[in-house]
Each structure stands twice: as structure tokens, then as C-alpha cells.
């Protein structure tokens, strides 16, 4: 992994469009989930890792911000940045862009935990995995964090 952000490109499928004529909120999450799979593969903790280590990543929580509509056929570019980690958790953020535009159309911040698939309990990353993710974090920490990273959901009404 480099200091470059992981990038995933997806096109809005016709089935993802709702009766308002734009991409339904559930499919933003689906697109972000596909970006998570790509990101995990880049970190070496994706599908192959599950088979080799009998471990996987489980999502503990997400924040999604819908900033602008996207429509059928739009090409979406999702960048993913590692923000923080400890011995068994990762926090990362996806930013979704329409085509080559520079302003995001949606954001998705995620917190995930490392889980042993036999016990179905969280456990620390194996040393080699931790080392690999630490190296990625050392590169990613050099990048500016999005202003919305780490925000608390909601406001007082």
C-alpha cells in the first residue's frame, strides 16, 4: 500500500434508482461496501485473508452523509483512507465523487473490528497483519483527513 488513497470505480446501476429518480440511500451503502472490500484487499485482510487466517473484519458502526444526488449511469469514484487503528480495530473513511469532480457527493466513515471466525469473538490482529497495517497507517497518516472525519452523528434539536 502507498500513501495514495485506495480508489474504487462503480457505475450507478438502473436497479439502484428509486421512485425519486436518484440513487436510493441503500445503494450508497452498497457502493461503499464494495469500496471496503477493495480496501481490505489492499490491506491484505480481504477474502483471501479470511480463508488463510480464519479471521475477518466485522463492521461495528458507520456514518453516512448524503451530500448530493447521483443518477443512473453516473460513474462514481470512491476513495478510501485509513484514519486510525489499534490492535484489533480500524477506522477509515470513504469519499464518493461523481466522475472527476472534486467535491464529494457522499461520505462514509466506518469502524471495524478483527474477529476470529471460529470463536466469533474479536481478537488482536496477528503480528504480521498488524505490521502490514501499521505500515499502511504510517503512509496514510501523512494525508490530510477530511473535515468530517470523527464527527458525532446528529445535532441537538
Image (cartoon, helix red, strand yellow):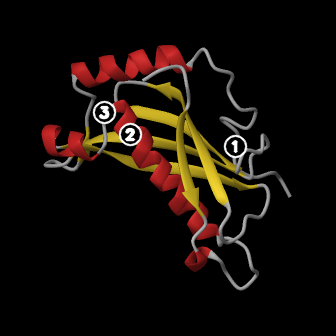
User: Whole-percent x and y of residue 97?
Assistant: 70, 48
- Please say if 101 is above or below 67: above
Residue denoted by label 2? 40
Would you identify the image quadrant in which residue 57 lies? top left
User: Whole-percent x and y of residue 28?
Assistant: 60, 61
Q: Residue furthest bottom?
A: 19
Residue at (60, 46) in percent of width and height: 78
103 or 75: which is nearer to us? 75
Would you identify the image quadrant in which residue 127 lies? top left
Q: Earlier in the sequence, mark 2 or mark 1?
A: 2
Quarter of the image that includes the N terminus:
top left
Q: Residue furthest right?
A: 157
Q: Nearer the viewer, mark 3 or mark 1?
A: 3
Distance, label 2 to label 1, CA atoms, is: 25 Å
Distance, label 2 to label 3, CA atoms, is: 6 Å
Q: Nearer the viewer, mark 2 or mark 1?
A: 2
- Please say if 157 is above or below 80: below
- Please say if 130 is above or below 93: above
Quarter of the image that includes the C terminus:
bottom right
Label at residue 36: none
Q: Secondary structure at mark 3?
A: loop
Residue at (22, 50) in percent of width and height: 120
Distance, label 3 to label 1, CA atoms, is: 29 Å
Residue denoted by label 3? 44
Q: Secondary structure at mark 1?
A: loop
Rate crowding at label 1 as few (under 14), some (14 to 19) or many (20 or more) other CA atoms within 10 Å: few
Marks 3 and 1 close (CB-CB < 8 Å): no
User: Whole-percent x and y of residue 65?
Assistant: 71, 53
Label at residue 152: 1
Amino acid at each position: 500500500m502507498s500513501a495514495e488513497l485506495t480508489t474504487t470505480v462503480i457505475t450507478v446501476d438502473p436497479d439502484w434508482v428509486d421512485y425519486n429518480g436518484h440513487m436510493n440511500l441503500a445503494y450508497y451503502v452498497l457502493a461503499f461496501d464494495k469500496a471496503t472490500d477493495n480496501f481490505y484487499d489492499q490491506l491484505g485482510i480481504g477474502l483471501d485473508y479470511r480463508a488463510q487466517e480464519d479471521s475477518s473484519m466485522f463492521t461495528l458502526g458507520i456514518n453516512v452523509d448524503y451530500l448530493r444526488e447521483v443518477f443512473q449511469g453516473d460513474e462514481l469514484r470512491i476513495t478510501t483512507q485509513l484514519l486510525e487503528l489499534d490492535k484489533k480495530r480500524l477506522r477509515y473513511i470513504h469519499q464518493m465523487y461523481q466522475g472527476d469532480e472534486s467535491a464529494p457527493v457522499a461520505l462514509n466513515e466506518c469502524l471495524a473490528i478483527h474477529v476470529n471466525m471460529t470463536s466469533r469473538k474479536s481478537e488482536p490482529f496477528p503480528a504480521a497483519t498488524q505490521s502490514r497495517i501499521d505500515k499502511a497507517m504510517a503512509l496514510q497518516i501523512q494525508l490530510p483527513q477530511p473535515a468530517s472525519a470523527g464527527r458525532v452523528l446528529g445535532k441537538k434539536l
